[in-house]
Image (cartoon, rainbow, N blue to C red):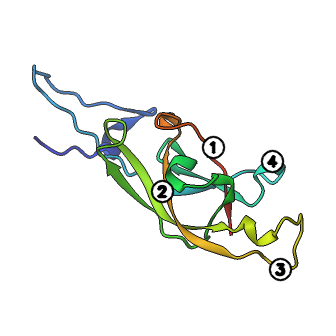
Amino acid sequence: GEAVDAARLTGAGYLRIARRWRTGDIVELDLAMPIERVAAHPAVVDDRGRVALRRGPVVYCCEAVDLGVDPDALTLGRDAQLRARHDPDLLGGVTVIEGEGAVGDADAFAGQLYRVGAPPSRPCRVRAVPYYAWDNRAPGAMRVWLREG
């Protein structure tokens, strides 16, 4: 096939390819879909200090089935390197976002509601799935807005 520069053919939000189409013609679309950290407006109190992961138009979420803990305990480092990886074995083929995070140790509170100093945390592997794919493997907690620190 031949490559087409989409920037030259885009108009009014559409990509128009004018040609004589034949049975068996294939259009392969290669879109840049970098991983982005999206922040909510500060007026959205529940999401202060949190980010959502997005890749192109797709919003991602973290599930307990992948983390082994409630995703609310997860903190995603501000400098954490995130990468997209296609997992052909997940629900027939899904692109996931992977990286490193940390999980706080609630046991460090020893039954108390408060403690002096930050509780210890341990590193954990972060795996986020597209929001449309959540709750298809095992019941459990899910979170879109992840604490960032």
Seen at 47% across and 33% down, the residue is 136
- In the picture of the structure, the residue carrying the numbered disc 4 is 44
Kindly identify the amino acid type of the residue bearing the numbered disc 3: Gly
Kindly identify the amino acid type of the residue bearing the numbered disc 1: Ala
Coordinates of residue 15 in the picture (x, y in percent):
34, 34
Coordinates of residue 133 in the picture (x, y in percent):
47, 36
Q: Is residue 138 left or right of residue 23?
A: right
- In the picture of the structure, the residue carrying the numbered disc 1 is 141
Tag 2: Cα neighbours inside 10 Å, few (<14), some, or many (≥20)? some
Whole-angstrom CA distance, mark 2 to mark 4, is: 22 Å
Q: Which mark is residue 32?
A: none
Determine the residue located farthest toward the top in the rendered image: 23
Q: What element does badge 2 sit on?
A: strand
Whole-angstrom CA distance, mark 4 to mark 1, is: 21 Å
Whole-angstrom CA distance, mark 2 to mark 3, is: 33 Å
108, above or below 137, in the image: below
Q: Are marks 3 and 1 in contact (CB under 8 Å)?
A: no
* First along the sequence among labels 2 and 3: 2
Seen at 45% across and 32% down, the residue is 12
Q: Give the quarter of the figure containing the N terminus.
A: top left
* First along the sequence among labels 2 and 4: 2
- In the picture of the structure, the residue carrying the numbered disc 3 is 117
Tag 3: Cα neighbours inside 10 Å, few (<14), some, or many (≥20)? few
Whole-angstrom CA distance, mark 3 to mark 1, is: 27 Å
Tag 4: Cα neighbours inside 10 Å, few (<14), some, or many (≥20)? few
Residue 63 appears in the picture as rendered: no
Coordinates of residue 82 in the picture (x, y in percent):
47, 64
Q: What element does badge 4 sit on?
A: loop
Kindly identify the amino acid type of the residue bearing the numbered disc 2: Ile
Seen at 13% across and 23% down, the residue is 20
Mark 2 vs mark 3: give the one in front.
Answer: 3
Determine the residue located farthest toward the front in the rendered image: 111
